[in-house]
Image (spheres, grey):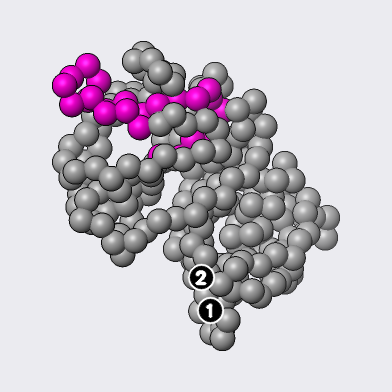
Amino acid sequence: MRKLFVGIVALVLVMSFAGIASAQGTATGYVVHGIPGLVVDVYVDGQLFVKDFTPGTIAGPLVGPADRSGDVVIVPAGGNPANPALQATVSFAAGSNVSIVAHLDANGNPTLSIFDNDFSATSDARLIARHTAAAPAVDALFFPGTANELRVGPLSNGQQAVAALAPGSYNGGLVPTGTSNLVYGPFAQNLQPGKVYVVYFIGSLTGGTFTNLTQVVDAG
């Protein structure tokens, strides 16, 4: 649970300083809440900053000055900030663009993964698949069983795979690495040129909460 709270603290700090000028540069961040059933309140310097931060939520882009620290307190939703679950001081490096994902590890325990974001310009469609679920290693399989079959992976918990794809409509699903037996899907996605598609697999496969959460960003 501590790792989860640290992850939320880190990105909320970026939010708390948004819009303040900094001679040292800025940092950009996103946060993904991928743990089922956990809702929290966040306090920054004693003030309620985020209330009822819910699972399945992506916040961002959140831009603020880098290399600046602040005090953040996190409590379970409705809790008393005088009795924090965690109190921390954190900051970001200048020029960073990251996504901080609070999620379940392969064994179903809360954990934290931080991913650097490549949102640079592209004429293709960039697909970024991030495995942040309580599930075994998987491949993303597109156009299964056809001459155009495309496999992206392998992906273990806490890892990502990046692919430059021609724009168009894709159908596929998730399979255990090296197999063709769908464990999730099928699903369809229309990929447009100049876009970045970040797909998070979150929840628990055996717990019945496994799903995907897609973020679409303009490249460049």
Q: Residue 35: percent from the left, percent from the top?
A: 58, 38
| Residue 18 is at least partly visible in this image | no
- Mark 1: amino acid: Gly
Q: Could you tell me which residue is drawn at 65 percent across and 40 percent down?
A: 111
Check contact, mark 1 vs mark 2: CB within 8 A. yes
**Total count of labels:** 2
Crowding at dot 1, Cα within 10 Å, few <14 / some 14-19 / many 20+, comes out as some
* Element type where label 1 sits in the image: loop
* Element type where label 2 sits in the image: loop
Q: Could you tell me which residue is drawn at 29 percent across and 61 percent down?
A: 121
Q: Which stretch appears magenta?
A: 129-152
Pick out the residue farthest to the right: 83
Residue 190 drawn above or below residue 182: below
Q: Quadrant of residue 83?
A: bottom right
Task: Identify the residue position indicated by label 1 in the image.
Answer: 25
Q: Residue 48: percent from the left, percent from the top?
A: 66, 65
Image quadrant where one finds the N terminus: top right
The disc at residue 95 is: 2
Q: Residue 157: percent from the left, percent from the top?
A: 55, 33
Residue 95 falls left or right of residue 163: right
Q: Could you tell me which residue is drawn at 44 percent across and 19 percent down?
A: 176
| Residue 153 is at least partly visible in this image | yes
Q: Is residue 136 magenta?
A: yes
Rounded to the nearest whole Å, what is the CA distance between mark 1 and mark 2? 6 Å
